[in-house]
Image (spheres, rainbow, N blue to C red):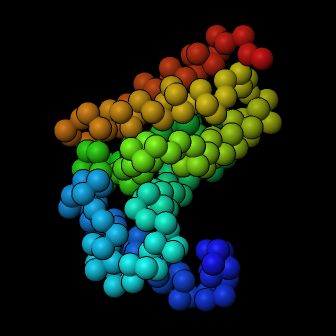
Amino acid sequence: MHTDAVTERTGGRSARIRAAALGALAELLDEQPADAITTSEVARRSEVNRTTLHRRWGGMPGLLADLAVEELNVHSPLPEDAGDLRTELRQWAERVITALNRHQAGRSPFVAALLRAVQDGHAPGELLQGRLDVLDQMLARAAERGEQVRLTAYDLVEIVLLPIYAARLLAPEPLAPELADRLVDRFLTLNASSPGT
């Protein structure tokens, strides 16, 4: 049965199952690498039947992806309209850094989900699409204010987002907020010098 149909029909119970499963997975990610976690462990920790986990999420890649999107939505949503793109980009990049610093290096749900998707031979486009949608909204809002927007959400991912993830994977210590300033300045410099489309 399709997940949306189950969610609609069971309401609160479905939400409780999701909260329990994702909460258990988040705890396990703080204790061990993502590739060592199994649905059996998530089932034991969450007290959700393993069959339910597979039916609803299709296994670990789906669970990791759902947790990743949930964390991104909670900890690095689209910033409020601040009146200028630089301020909004810095707020967003700082939120991403703060979210990644909540976990040990390499154990962010988003990073874990990306790596698992690649390991399983899947393109992680679905995870990145959610980020691209948020960034598109931010850039579109800036353009509506009359700001010069020549680069795209894909450029923003390449210039700002991916370097943050790479730095967190490589750094033994939490990332400094100043990294957001450097990467946002780089994006804006390239944006200003780009011929656009």
* Residue 64 quadrant: bottom left
Q: Is residue 110 above or below residue 10?
A: above
* Residue 59 quadrant: bottom left
The residue at the point 39 percent across, 37 percent down is 165
Residue 56 located left or right of residue 191: left
The residue at the point 61 percent across, 87 percent down is 11
- Most foreground residue, 168 or 106: 106
The residue at the point 29 percent across, 53 percent down is 35
Q: Is residue 92 above or below residue 51?
A: above
Figure quadrant of the N terminus? bottom right
Figure quadrant of the C terminus? top right
Instruction: Give how far across and how far down residue 190 sits, in percent.
Output: 58, 15
Residue 152 located left or right of residue 52: right
Residue 171 located left or right of residue 7: left
Instruction: Give how far across and how far down residue 86 sits, in percent.
Output: 58, 31
- Most foreground residue, 35 or 150: 35
Instruction: Give how far across and how far down residue 72 sits, in percent.
Output: 49, 54
